[in-house]
Image (tube, rainbow, N blue to C red):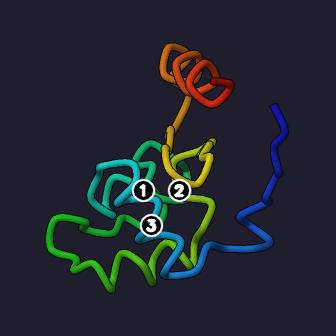
């Protein structure tokens, strides 16, 4: 399986990419934020009161607070370290 590595710290996702990731992953934009990351803990944003545009701006300004890794084939998206989901993803991508 071929893949492309992208360093999101150097090349943050665009608003369109963030929205597509959330949509294809079946999650709200706030779920793209890794609330356990050191960067998140330093910033202490209140995601519960933030609108989508604010969350997009937060992620673009601080891409290292995103849940990682993010693996996608352009249709399906897997967020974080979930071995069983990666196995299913790889299997379905090869067929």
The residue sitting at 56% across, 25% down in the picture is 92
Q: Name which quarter of the figure residue 8 lies in.
A: bottom right
Question: Quick one: label 2, few (<14), some, or many (20+) residues within 10 Å?
Answer: many
Left or right of residue 9: residue 88: left
Tell me residue 46's x, y (percent).
24, 68
> Would you place residue 60 above or below residue 74 in this image?
below
Disc 2 to disc 3, C-alpha distance: 14 Å
For the residue pair 92 and 24, the one nearer the viewer reads as 92
- Chain-order first, disc 2 or disc 3: 3
Q: Position of residue 7 (x, y in %)?
A: 79, 60
Query: Is the C-beta separation of discs 2 and 1 under 8 Å?
Result: yes
Disc 2 is placed on an element classified as loop
**Secondary structure of residue under mark 3:** helix
Classify residue 35 as left or right of residue 84: left
Q: CA distance from mark 2 to mark 1?
A: 5 Å
Q: Residue furthest front?
A: 95
Q: Disc 3 or disc 1, which is closer to the eye?
A: 3
- The residue tagged 3 is 20
In-front residue for pair 92/67: 92
User: Which residue occupies 55% across, 78% down?
Assistant: 60
Residue 83 horizontal side relative to residue 2, left or right: left
Q: Which mark is residue 66?
A: 2
Mark 1 — residue? 33
Quick one: quadrant of the C terminus? top right
């Amino acid at each position: 399986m071929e893949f492309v590595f992208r360093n999101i710290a150097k090349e943050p996702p665009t608003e369109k990419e963030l929205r597509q990731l959330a949509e294809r992953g079946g999650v709200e934009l706030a779920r793209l934020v890794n609330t356990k990351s050191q960067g998140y803990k330093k910033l202490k944003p209140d995601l519960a009161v933030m609108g989508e545009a604010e969350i997009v701006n937060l992620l673009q300004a601080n891409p290292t607070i995103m849940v990682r890794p993010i693996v996608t084939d352009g249709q399906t998206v897997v967020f974080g370290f979930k071995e069983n989901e990666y196995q299913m993803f790889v299997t379905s991508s090869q067929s």
